[in-house]
Image (cartoon, grey):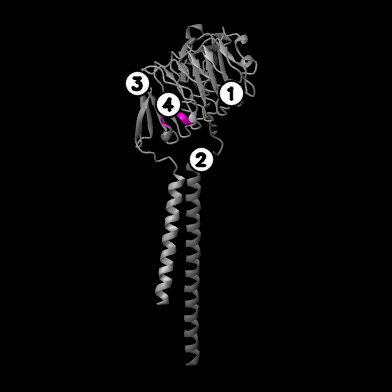
C-alpha cells in the first residue's frame, strides 16, 4: 500500500512539473504566435497572416496618424510581424504607425508614398535595410530613430525635408546618401551614428540648411561628406590606363553604376605588357571614383645557353661511358683469369701431393719385402 502511495505522489509531482514547463513555454512565446487577424483603419484595411508573419496595409490615400504606439489598429500583431507591405495607392505613413515592431525585418513601400510621419518606423530594431521610394518628400521627427540594425539609407532627390532625430541612434548605419537639396535637415538628425563613414551630399547643398547639431556624435559630418553632381546617387567610375608615363587615352573608361551596385571592370590585355591591376572592383556609393592602371613591359624571355661539351683529344684518354664499361669488363676478365689460375694452381698442387704419396707407399712396400 505504501509503495502505491509513493508511486502516486511521484506521478503527481512529474505531472505538476510538466504543467509548469508548458506554462512557462507559453508565457515565453508572448505574442509571437498571433493568429490571423484583420481590420480597418480609416479608409484603409489591414490584415495579418500568421503563416508568413506578414502585415499588409491596403487601400488608397493618406494613413491617419495615431496618438501613440499603443493606439495602432494592429496592436495585437505589432510584435509578431516580420514583414510589412504597404500597398500601392497609399500616400503616407501616419505618426507611430509602425513604431516598435521589434521583429520587423522587411518593409515594402509603395511608389505613391510621399511622407513618413513622426516615429513612423521608430525603434524597429531588426530592420537592416529600407528602400525609400522616389517621390517621397518628407521624413517626420524620429522617423527611423533607434533602428539599431539599419545599415544605410538612400534618400532620393525628391526629399526636401528631414525631421529632427530622423536617424538618431542608428548605431549600425555606415552610409547616408542625400541626393537632393533638402530645405532643412533637423536637429540631431544623425545623432550618435558612430559608424557613419560614407556620407554623400549634392555639390549644391549648402550648410546653412543643416542644423548645427545634425551630426552630433556621428563619425562624419557635412564638412567630411563626399559631394556629387549626380541626382540619382549613381557613381561615375573612371579608369585611366598608363604606359611609359603617358595615358592611353583611347582606352579610358567612364562608366556609371547605380547606388549600391557592385562593379568589376576587367583590364584589357596588351601584348608584351603586364598591368598592375587585373580587375577594378568596388561598390557604387554615390561618389565619383577614379582608378589608374599601369602597364609594365615584360622582361625579355630568358633562353638557356647550350651546355658545351669538351671534345676529347685524340692523344688523351677521355673518361666516357663506353670507356668505363670497357674498364669494368677488363677488370672482370682479369679477375676471372686470376681465379682460374689460382684454382688451376691448387689443382696441380693436390695432384702432385697425391703422386708423391703414392710413390712413398710403393717404396715402403718394396722395402718391406
Nearer the camera: disc 1 or disc 4: 4
- Upstream in the sequence, badge 4 or badge 3? 3
Drawn side of residue 20 relative to residue 207, left or right: left
The magenta stretch spans residue 252 = no
Q: Which residues are magenta?
A: 70-74
Q: Position of residue 135 (x, y in %)?
A: 43, 13
As measured in the structure, the alpha-carbon distance from the residue carrying label 2 to the one carrying label 4 is: 87 Å
Q: Which residue is mark 3?
A: 59
Assess disc 4: are there few (<14), some (14-19) or many (≥20) residues with their C-alpha within 10 Å of its C-alpha: some
Give the residue displayed 65% in from the left and 15% down from the top: 212
User: Which label sits on residue 320?
Assistant: 2
Q: Nearer the viewer, residue 318 or 69?
A: 69
Q: Which residue is mark 1?
A: 196
Q: Secondary structure at mark 3?
A: loop
Residue 52 vs 213, above or below: the answer is: below
Give the residue displayed 48% in from the left and 9% down from the top: 251
Amino acid at each position: 500500500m505504501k509503495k502505491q502511495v509513493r508511486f502516486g505522489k511521484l506521478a503527481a509531482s512529474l505531472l505538476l512539473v510538466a504543467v509548469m514547463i508548458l506554462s512557462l513555454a507559453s508565457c515565453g512565446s508572448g505574442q509571437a504566435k498571433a493568429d490571423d487577424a484583420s481590420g480597418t483603419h480609416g479608409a484603409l484595411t489591414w490584415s495579418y497572416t500568421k503563416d508568413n508573419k506578414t502585415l499588409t496595409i491596403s487601400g488608397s490615400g493618406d494613413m491617419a496618424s495615431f496618438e501613440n504606439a499603443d493606439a495602432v489598429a494592429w496592436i495585437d500583431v505589432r510584435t509578431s510581424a516580420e514583414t510589412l507591405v504597404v500597398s500601392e495607392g497609399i500616400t503616407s505613413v501616419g505618426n507611430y504607425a509602425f513604431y516598435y515592431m521589434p521583429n520587423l525585418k522587411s518593409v515594402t513601400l509603395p511608389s505613391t508614398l510621399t511622407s513618413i510621419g513622426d516615429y513612423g518606423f521608430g525603434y524597429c530594431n531588426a530592420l537592416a535595410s529600407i528602400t525609400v521610394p522616389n517621390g517621397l518628400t518628407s521624413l517626420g521627427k524620429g522617423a527611423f530613430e533607434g533602428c539599431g540594425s539599419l545599415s544605410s539609407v538612400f534618400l532620393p532627390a525628391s526629399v526636401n525635408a528631414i525631421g529632427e532625430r530622423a536617424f538618431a541612434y542608428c548605431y549600425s548605419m555606415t552610409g547616408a546618401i542625400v541626393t537632393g537639396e533638402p530645405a532643412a535637415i533637423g536637429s540631431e538628425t544623425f545623432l550618435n551614428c558612430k559608424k557613419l563613414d560614407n556620407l554623400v551630399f549634392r555639390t549644391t547643398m549648402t550648410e546653412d540648411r543643416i542644423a548645427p547639431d545634425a551630426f552630433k556624435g556621428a563619425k562624419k559630418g557635412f564638412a567630411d561628406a563626399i559631394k556629387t553632381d549626380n541626382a540619382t546617387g549613381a557613381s561615375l567610375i573612371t579608369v585611366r590606363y598608363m604606359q611609359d608615363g603617358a595615358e592611353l587615352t583611347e582606352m579610358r573608361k567612364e562608366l556609371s553604376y547605380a547606388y549600391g551596385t557592385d562593379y568589376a571592370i576587367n583590364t584589357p590585355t596588351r601584348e608584351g605588357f603586364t598591368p598592375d591591376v587585373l580587375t577594378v572592383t568596388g561598390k557604387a556609393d554615390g561618389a565619383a571614383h577614379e582608378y589608374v592602371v599601369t602597364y609594365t613591359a615584360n622582361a625579355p624571355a630568358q633562353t638557356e645557353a647550350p651546355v658545351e661539351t669538351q671534345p676529347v683529344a685524340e692523344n688523351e684518354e677521355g673518361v666516357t661511358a663506353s670507356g668505363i664499361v670497357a674498364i669494368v669488363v677488363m677488370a672482370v676478365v682479369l679477375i676471372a683469369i686470376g681465379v682460374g689460375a689460382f684454382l688451376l694452381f691448387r689443382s696441380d698442387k693436390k695432384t702432385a701431393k697425391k703422386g708423391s704419396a703414392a710413390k712413398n707407399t710403393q717404396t715402403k712396400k718394396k722395402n718391406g719385402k
